[in-house]
Amino acid sequence: ANRAVLKEVSVFPNPVRRNTKLQVVGLAEKPLITIYSVIGQRMAQYADNAFLIDLPAGCYLLRITDKNNKPACQTLIVE
């Protein structure tokens, strides 16, 4: 199985305020981004590299997947 991961992906701003645009950089194409709570509940999913964050304050995990299903994970803090 191909276990390659995305290494050059970053998310900003982080921390982010609610109702602020979040951007994912480091990918040539639009990724699939899934946001999970710290207990593993899927909170949101986006198929773009810029989107509006509308989540309660807290800590989240972003799973960023490119078109080849290579994953990257980032922690996101919403203030």
Image: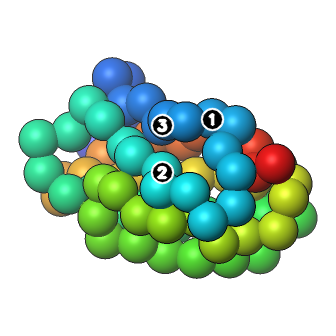
* Horizontal relation, residue 62 to residue 22: left or right: right
Q: Amino acid at mark 3?
A: Val
Which of label 3 and label 2 is nearer to you? 2
Q: Position of residue 23 (x, y in %)?
A: 40, 46
Please count the marks in the image: 3
Q: Is residue 35 above or below residue 17?
A: below
Q: Are marks 3 and 2 in contact (CB under 8 Å)?
A: yes
- The reply, left or right, for residue 15 in relation to residue 45 is right
**Residue at left offset 11%, top offset 41%:** 28
The residue carrying mark 1 is: 14
Residue 53 vertical position relative to residue 64 in the rendered view, above or below: below
Q: CA distance from mark 1 to mark 3?
A: 7 Å
Reply above or below: 37 against 25: below
Of pointers 3 and 2, the one earlier in the residue sequence: 3
Crowd around label 2: few <14 · some 14–19 · many ≥20 (10 Å): some
Marks 3 and 2, Cα distance to the nearest angstrom? 7 Å
Return the residue nearer the eye: 77 or 60: 77
Q: Residue at x 88, y 64 (%)?
A: 39
Residue at label 3? 11
Q: Residue flagged by tag 1: what amino acid is it?
A: Asn
| Any part of residue 17 in sight | yes
Q: Any mark on residue 22, and which?
A: 2
In which image quadrant can residue 9 be found? top left
- Secondary structure under badge 1? loop
Residue located 47% across and 56% down the image: 21
Residues at marks 2 and 1 touching, judged by CB atoms closer than 8 Å? yes
**SS type, badge 3:** strand
